[in-house]
Image: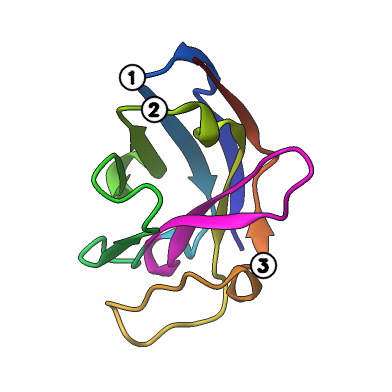
Amino acid sequence: QVQLVESGGGLVQAGGSLRLSCAASGRTFSRNPMGWFRQAPGKEREFVAAISWTGGTAYHADSVKGRFTISREHAKNTLYLQMNSLKPEDTAVYYCAAVTRYVSDSYYYSSNLGEYDIWGQGTQVTVSS
């Protein structure tokens, strides 16, 4: 199993940047597809980005494509979300998540919330205009 702890959130002006980190632990981390989701006040949780367990395949939601980049470093047991050109509409609580079921395809990734069964506690990102 995998345990996740997010960090790096904060307050930033529009156009600025933040890097979120998700520290992961667990014997199966190297084979866990992972992703980032976010939830704004009064809205449902939405997909942001996903990455395969090898790190060789990544997918980003249209709303953040070209601005956000998901990555992972197995040696540090850490998932990252680099966020550039931030907009006020990016304001939300950001969550990292992992797929714990065995995945034979090393390029597998998912944008579906229901595929993830391990979640971090979330970190607040606030972007001022």
Which residue is at 53% across, 48% downward? 25
Residue 34: image location, x then y, percent:
46, 60
Query: Mark 1, residues whose alpha carbon is within 10 Å: few (<14), some, or many (≥20)?
Result: some
The residue that label 3 is drawn on is 117
Query: Mark 3, residues whose alpha carbon is within 10 Å: few (<14), some, or many (≥20)?
Result: few
The residue under label 1 is which amino acid type?
A: Gly
* 7 inside magenta stretch: no
Gap between marks 2 and 3, in whole Å? Answer: 28 Å
Badge number at residue 15? 1
Residue 88: image location, x then y, percent:
51, 26
- 52 vs 85, nearest the viewer: 85
Earlier-in-chain disc, 2 versus 3: 2
Instruction: Farthest residue to the right: give it.
Output: 42
Gap between marks 3 and 1, in whole Å? Answer: 33 Å
The residue under label 3 is which amino acid type?
A: Asp
Q: Secondary structure at mark 3?
A: loop
